[in-house]
Image (cartoon, rainbow, N blue to C red):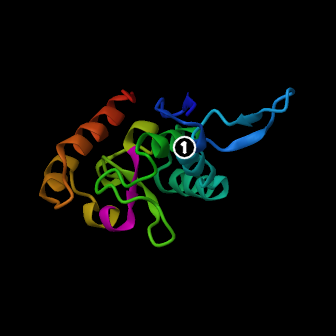
């Protein structure tokens, strides 16, 4: 079976894992460069909801440099469309929110390195706690997810 490497996640997958994207000139089926999983994560991000979030953040904090839609898409793709803390995937029952790793109440900026996707339960539970004291106490804690969050904060994404 033919394989192809996803341009977003970099994983080699079978062609059936890529959405069809029309036909080549010679009649062969053409496939997207991003796999179905990455395509699904990216296409469900609402530009309208994001711009509302950013304008509210500007009003609340007075910040000028804020999270862009591209930054949020990259965060969602980096965390594979799941909560960075517990790993639950976004679904009809689970909404992922923009979570400040360093809380706004502790001068945490609304920037790419400080925003990660979190389910409502984790976001509400964390509130204004520090990541290093709150997260290890959670049942869903894993060292792997903690390292992934720390890498995101440092800007190391692969």
Q: Which residue reaches farthest bottom?
A: 93
Instruction: Report x, y in % for residue 41.
Output: 54, 50
- Furthest-right residue in view? 25
- Badge 1: few (under 14), some or many (20 or more) residues near its Cα, within 10 Å? many
Can residue 66 be seen here? The reply is: no
Q: Main secondary structure of the magenta part?
A: strand
> Above or below — where is 124 with respect to 116?
below
Q: Is residue 95 located in the magenta-colored stretch of the structure?
A: no
Residue for point 33% across, 46% down:
107
Rendered-image quadrant of the C terminus: top left
Q: Nearer the viewer, residue 21 or 104?
A: 21
Quadrant showing the N terminus: top right
Residue 71 spot, x, y in % from top left: 52, 39
Which is more toward the observer, 104 or 29? 29
Q: Which residues are magenta?
A: 115-122
Q: Position of residue 54 (x, y in %)?
A: 56, 51
Location of mark 1 (residue): 38
Query: Residue 98, percent across and down?
Result: 44, 54
In this rendering, is residue 62 above or below 74? below
* Numbered disc total: 1
The structure residue drawn at horizontal position 45% and vertical position 38%, both measured from the top left corner, is 112
Residue 117 within the magenta-colored segment of the rendering: yes
Residue 73: image quadrant is top right
* Residue pictured at 46% horizontal, 61% vertical: 90
Quick one: SS at disc 1? helix
């Amino acid at each position: 079976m033919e394989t192809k490497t996803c341009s977003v996640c970099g994983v080699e997958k079978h062609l059936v894992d890529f959405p069809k994207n029309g036909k080549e000139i010679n009649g062969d089926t053409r496939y997207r460069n991003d796999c179905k999983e990455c395509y699904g994560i990216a296409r469900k991000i609402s530009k309208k909801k994001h711009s509302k979030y950013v304008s509210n953040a500007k009003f609340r904090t007075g910040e000028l440099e804020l999270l862009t839609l591209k930054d949020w898409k990259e965060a969602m793709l980096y965390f594979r469309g799941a909560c960075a803390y517990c790993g639950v995937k976004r679904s009809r029952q689970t909404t992922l929110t923009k979570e400040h790793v360093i809380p706004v109440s502790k001068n945490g900026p609304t920037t790419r390195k400080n925003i990660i996707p979190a389910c409502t339960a984790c976001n509400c539970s964390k509130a204004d706690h520090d990541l290093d004291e709150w997260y290890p106490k959670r049942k869903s804690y894993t060292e792997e997810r903690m390292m992934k969050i720390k890498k995101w904060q440092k800007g190391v994404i692969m």
